[in-house]
Image (spheres, rainbow, N blue to C red):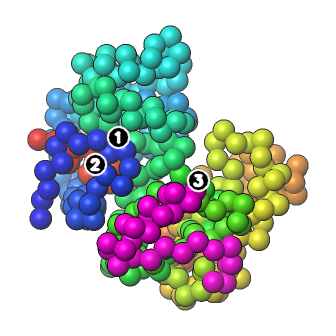
């Protein structure tokens, strides 16, 4: 079943019904099939899209760029030093200017209020590539990956382990509630998600036969799950909190002992980048300062048969393409 999402913004999954999310996943699946078959889409032919990045990115930038070009659009990258957003010019004024020049706008940055203002004042579809509160395009990629490997979403037992109050935990909780999943946020009490958002997620869950559990017990949260998901312990902009986070989250590291609590065919997902070895500059700095070779996930798990992180990374492009085609395409 097709849905008319033309002109819609994509800021958070709270704004979309379960059937609309299902439609976006189905569309992503079809666009992925076409790309693998060598069929070149023209759904965005003649369109120009602005890609605003306050925060650096690998997957989000590349996914939006390739997705746009695949469908015939021209993407224009605008880094934080390229435009006057919020510096010499208000977000509202910038939005009004960009909306007259571009057909769609992606924003990846800090304040969620910024992407909301772009949506309010630009007059064109605006897509959230990540804010401090939500990361909805990542959730679509996660769900497409789970569906590809498990065949379904409704009823999936899903444990997010780690920092329970970051944008990934927030977005996964809302998405899982929409799609009828058994979602567990497993984190220290100090990092539980914001109470108001939990209540909102539980109301959504009640409408979709989903379940939301918030616990600091790894055994309670992970036992028998189909999916274990984690994220970095320190988000961008919080680098001064490494020592505190390591102390809080070390018991929540995803390792093989934790994986043994899950279903034997459980998947491991991570939105990336992941600190699982010493192959990065930051990883080596962490090791030198704190003596940790691995942080949120061990190399053994990251490279195991359970890990589908690179399928998940690729699916960022297919699901982002679906969002742009659905909201801006012909």
**Between marks 1 and 2, how big is the CA–CA gap?**
8 Å
Residues tagged 3 and 2 counted as in contact (Cβ below 8 A): no
Q: Which residue is mark 3?
A: 166
Q: Is residue 297 visible?
A: no
Mark 2, other Cα within 10 Å: few <14 / some 14–19 / many ≥20:
many
Mark sitting earlier along the chain (3/1): 1
Numbered circle sitting on residue 127: 1
Pointers 3 and 1 in contact (C-beta within 8 Å): no
Asked where in the image residue 180 lies, by quadrant, the reply is bottom left
In the rendered structure, are the residues bearing label 1 and label 2 in contact, judged by CB atoms less than 8 Å apart? yes
Magenta region, residue range: 194-220
User: Which numbered marker is on residue 327?
Assistant: none
Instruction: Kindly identify the residue that appears in the image at 46 percent across and 35 percent down.
Output: 113
In the drawing, does residue 184 fall left or right of residue 292?
left
Is 322 positioned to the left or the right of 136 in the image?
left
Q: Is residue 184 above or below residue 52?
A: below
Q: Quadrant of residue 200?
A: bottom left
Pointer 2: what residue?
323
Q: Which is nearer the eye, 193 or 328?
A: 193
């Amino acid at each position: 079943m097709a849905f008319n999402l033309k002109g819609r913004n994509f800021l958070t999954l709270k704004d979309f019904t379960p059937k609309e999310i299902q439609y976006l996943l189905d569309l992503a699946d079809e666009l992925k099939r076409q790309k693998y078959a060598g069929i070149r889409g023209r759904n965005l032919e003649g369109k120009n899209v602005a890609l605003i990045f306050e925060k650096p990115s690998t997957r989000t930038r590349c996914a939006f760029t390739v997705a746009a070009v695949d469908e015939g659009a021209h993407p224009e990258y605008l880094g934080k030093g390229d435009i006057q957003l919020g510096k010499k010019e208000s977000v509202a004024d910038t939005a009004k200017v960009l909306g007259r020049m571009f057909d769609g706008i992606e924003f990846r940055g800090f304040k969620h209020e910024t992407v909301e203002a772009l949506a309010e004042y630009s007059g064109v579809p605006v897509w959230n590539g990540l804010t401090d509160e939500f990361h909805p395009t990542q959730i679509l990629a996660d769900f497409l990956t789970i569906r590809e490997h498990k065949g379904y979403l409704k009823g999936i037992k899903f444990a997010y382990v780690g920092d329970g109050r970051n944008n990934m935990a927030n977005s996964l909780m809302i998405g899982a509630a929409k799609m009828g999943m058994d979602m567990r946020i497993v984190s220290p009490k100090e990092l539980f998600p914001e109470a108001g958002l939990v209540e909102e997620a539980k109301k959504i869950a009640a409408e979709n036969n989903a379940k939301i559990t918030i616990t600091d017990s790894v055994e309670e949260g992970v036992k028998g799950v189909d999916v274990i998901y984690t994220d970095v312990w320190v988000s961008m902009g919080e680098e001064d909190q490494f020592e505190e986070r390591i102390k809080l989250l070390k018991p929540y590291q995803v390792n093989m002992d934790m994986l043994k609590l899950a279903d034997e065919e459980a998947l491991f997902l991570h939105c990336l980048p992941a600190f699982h070895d010493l192959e990065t500059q930051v990883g080596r700095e962490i090791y030198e300062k704190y003596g940790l070779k691995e942080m949120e996930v061990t190399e053994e798990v990251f490279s195991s048969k359970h890990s589908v992180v690179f399928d998940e990374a690729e699916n960022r492009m297919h699901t982002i393409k679906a969002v742009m085609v659905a909201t801006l395409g012909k």
